[in-house]
Image (cartoon, grey):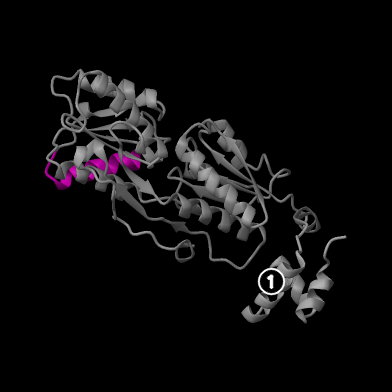
């Protein structure tokens, strides 16, 4: 037979109500009392029945994370952190791929999973501010990524304009002047691409360089094949680029492969910077310089804020928060001189300070 809350109360010398408040997080408990109850829980080996707890509250105990691509390492790394954070808070996180399809994003936004999950973390690509503002579903929602801003929902994303400026400024400081951008989009529905393009243009303007249209490559998606095809086209120009800033690491990796296949040396002939700092980029040859978002902060903040909304805890109004980012300089810009240190651009703050 399992350990009861009454047994814990007797062991800790507190009331049953106090134990219930500690275990269920109903209301604040004095720190000294909380520690005494926790000691009793540990000593008696109490394990809460999370399923029963959620059922008593009319919940499933499940939360969803909807991302554009399961195969994108950035989202895989983000999901892994979010799964662990959800488990620590007593929830099970399920991951769903939208495949960047507008109708799928709209369905999720409208509450298509409301009878299955207690809340949703969504990384939108094809929907915009108007669709989110028109939302009628009461399912708790947290937005991550750059797709939608200023929408009366919690929104967590790095400052993409600032991150892109830093990446391009790094290339300019190396003496590069024909800097290409790979990953622009032909439509208005990839807000993150537009923000990164804005940062690219701002950095060039600040250095007195023109943003040359022939060096801005449009891609339909954001994978290795897209970067490879775009780089091949750029290399065919009479004046090919001497540097590339890519929309993400996958595009950057594809672009490097195309450059190497064409006999170009990296970074001697072409320097390359990406965004996301996925693990794969650390082991490419040459290794990839990349802007590194604080993925842990993004995932943990998203899960914590969603759980706060689900459990109707007193929390601040919906907010936009911009977790920090850093730039990791590797061989794709520094050559053999790269030592792997992180260039601290926006120093990471504790998650608690952000959220």
Residue 134: x and y, percent? 56, 45
Decide if residue 283 is on the left or right side of residue 167.
right
Please count the marks in the image.
Answer: 1
Q: Which residues are magenta?
A: 194-209
Predominant SS along the magenta part: helix
Decide if residue 303 is on the left or right side of residue 114.
left
For the question of whether residue 248 can be seen, the reply is: no
Residue 204 colored magenta?
yes
Mark 1, residue position: 38
Residue 156: x and y, percent? 47, 52
In this rendering, the answer to whether 45 lies above or below 267 is below
Which residue shows up at 69% across the image and 45% down it?
114
Query: Which of the two residues, 98 or 235, is positioned nearer the viewer here?
Result: 235
In this rendering, the answer to whether 308 lies above or below 126 is below
Which residue shows up at 75% across the image and 60% down it?
47
Badge 1 density bin: few <14, some 14–19, many ≥20, Cα 10 Å:
some
Residue 218 colored magenta?
no
For the question of whether residue 355 can be seen, the reply is: yes
Say which quarter of the image contains residue 215. Answer: top left
């Amino acid at each position: 037979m399992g350990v009861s809350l009454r047994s814990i109360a007797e062991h800790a010398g507190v009331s049953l109500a106090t134990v219930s408040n500690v275990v269920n997080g109903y209301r604040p408990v004095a720190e000294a009392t909380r520690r005494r109850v926790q000691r009793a829980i540990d000593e008696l080996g109490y394990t809460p029945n999370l399923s029963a707890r959620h059922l008593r509250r009319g919940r499933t105990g499940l939360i969803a994370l909807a991302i554009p691509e399961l195969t994108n390492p950035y989202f895989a790394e983000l999901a892994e952190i979010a799964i662990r954070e959800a488990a620590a808070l007593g929830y099970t996180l399920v991951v769903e791929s939208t495949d960047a399809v507008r109708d799928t994003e709209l369905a999720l936004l409208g509450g298509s999973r409301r009878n299955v999950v207690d809340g949703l973390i969504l990384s939108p690509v094809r929907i915009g501010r108007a669709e989110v503002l028109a939302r009628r579903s009461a399912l708790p929602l947290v937005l991550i990524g750059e797709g939608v801003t200023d929408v009366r929902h919690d929104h967590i994303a790095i400052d993409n304009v600032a991150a892109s400026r830093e990446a391009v400024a790094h290339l300019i400081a190396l003496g590069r002047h024909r800097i290409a951008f790979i990953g622009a989009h032909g439509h208005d529905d990839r807000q993150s691409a537009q923000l990164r393009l804005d940062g690219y243009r701002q950095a060039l303007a600040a250095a007195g360089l023109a943003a040359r249209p022939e060096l801005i490559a449009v891609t339909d998606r954001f994978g290795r094949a897209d970067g490879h095809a775009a780089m091949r086209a750029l290399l065919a120009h009479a004046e090919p680029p001497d540097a590339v800033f890519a929309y993400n690491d996958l595009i950057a990796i594809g672009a490097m492969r195309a450059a190497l296949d064409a006999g170009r040396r990296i970074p001697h002939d072409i320097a390359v910077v990406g965004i996301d700092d996925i693990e794969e980029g650390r082991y490419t040859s040459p290794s990839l310089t990349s802007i590194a978002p604080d993925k842990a902060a993004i995932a943990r903040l998203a899960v914590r804020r969603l759980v706060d909304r689900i459990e109707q805890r007193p929390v601040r109004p919906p907010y936009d928060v911009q977790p920090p980012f850093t730039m990791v300089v590797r061989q794709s810009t520094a050559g053999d001189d790269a030592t792997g240190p992180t260039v601290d651009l926006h120093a990471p703050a504790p998650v608690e300070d952000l959220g």
